[in-house]
Image (cartoon, rainbow, N blue to C red):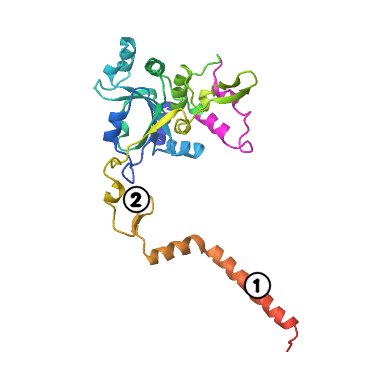
């Protein structure tokens, strides 16, 4: 009974809502650019994505590690592990990701064809270290998704006055001292940390050497950190090729002049009437209007009192 309830809850939590607009990037061009070892960021649309968005204040709610196609994995042992976790043995581009209710899994890159995604490429990483990062992720397949870790992360990011840090500080580790489960960004951070590749290291000033780098706790990473890190190159492909003859942006199929998108799929013509309507709605709410009327009445009353108290002069 408990397992059934949990499964239904996870399904409700991870259900993706349909997009209200087309993704801003060109997936067909992006899929040919992505390389093994790249981090793929996703702007999710599920309820858990909204929670992560609220916690991190970033549109990037999910991260995954691209490992290439099955034949790109040269090590036969690693390839066999990946095959065991594939739903279908197809020659497709593959990601390793951590999902609620599923844990660490292998997914096709095409899962996110209709999503806003971004590639974060580790700058200057050697081919051998990139393979080690991928191997680390492959060996983590099957680990459960750490929901408690997500809650603990929220505790660290929220103000102390709301949730003191001392509460639940043991959630990061098990009784043996080692994490028994993970989330998407922490696993990827662990993989890069294993080869001493920096993401957002702490820079400690040292009198003898000038400074030294200290690895950040991998469990404190969120998807936006790979976007923010100066050690990752950001790669994105707009729908239209900016390499076309300039100015390419003037050749785009724009809607007629005055048509604006109001978010959530609402498109309208922005005329003087709509401009006045938005102004009244945003700045002249009933409460503000009442306050202004009250203020005006007080001013008029004061003015009348002044006229009464002051004698007339020539």
Closer to us: 149 or 72? 72
SS of the residue under disc 2: loop
| Residue for badge 2 | 265
Residue 94 is one of the magenta-drawn residues: no
Closer to us: 161 or 133? 133
Residue beneath the point at 37% across and 36% down: 15
Location of residue 303 in the rendering, given as x and y in whole percent from the top left corner: 67, 77
- Nearest to N terminus: mark 2 or mark 1: 2
Chain part drawn in magenta: 150-175
- On the picture, is 161 further left or further right than 118? right
Rounded to the nearest angstrom, the CA distance separating label 2 from label 1 is 44 Å
Residue 294 vs 203, above or below: the answer is below
Confirm whether residue 110 shows in the render. Answer: no
- On the picture, is 130 further left or further right than 255? right
Location of residue 290 in the rendering, given as x and y in whole percent from the top left corner: 57, 67
- On the picture, is 12 further left or further right than 70? right
In the picture, residue 177 is in which quadrant?
top right
Look at the image and tell me in which quarter the N terminus lies: top left
């Amino acid at each position: 009974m408990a397992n059934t309830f949990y499964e239904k809850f996870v399904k409700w939590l991870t259900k993706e809502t349909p997009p209200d607009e087309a993704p801003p990037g060109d997936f067909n061009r992006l899929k040919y650019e992505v390389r093994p070892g790249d981090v793929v960021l996703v702007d999710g649309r599920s309820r858990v994505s909204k929670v992560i968005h609220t916690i991190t204040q970033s549109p990037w709610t999910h991260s995954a590690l691209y490992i290439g196609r099955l034949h790109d994995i040269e090590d036969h042992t690693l390839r066999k592990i990946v095959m065991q976790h594939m739903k279908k043995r197809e020659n497709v581009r593959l990601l390793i990701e951590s999902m609620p209710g599923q844990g660490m899994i292998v997914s096709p890159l095409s899962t996110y064809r209709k999503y806003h995604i971004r590639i974060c490429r580790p700058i200057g990483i050697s081919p051998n270290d990139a393979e080690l990062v991928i191997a680390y992720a492959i060996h983590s397949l099957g680990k459960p998704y750490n929901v408690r870790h997500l809650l603990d992360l929220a505790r660290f990011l929220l103000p102390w006055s709301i949730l003191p840090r001392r509460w639940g500080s043991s959630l990061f580790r098990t009784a043996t001292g080692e994490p028994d489960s993970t989330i998407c960004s922490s696993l990827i951070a662990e993989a890069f940390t294993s080869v001493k590749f920096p993401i957002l290291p702490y820079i400690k000033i040292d009198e003898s050497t000038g400074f030294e780098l200290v690895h950040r706790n991998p469990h404190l990473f969120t998807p936006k950190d790979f976007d923010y890190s100066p050690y990752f190159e950001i790669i994105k492909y707009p729908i239209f090729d900016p390499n076309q003859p300039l100015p390419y942006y003037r050749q785009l199929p724009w809607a007629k002049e005055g048509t604006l998108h109001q978010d959530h799929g609402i498109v309208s013509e922005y005329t003087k009437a709509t401009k006045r309507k938005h102004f009244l709605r945003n700045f002249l709410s009933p409460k503000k209007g009442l306050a202004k009327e009250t203020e005006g009445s007080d001013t008029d009353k004061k003015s009348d009192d002044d006229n009464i108290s002051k004698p007339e002069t020539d």
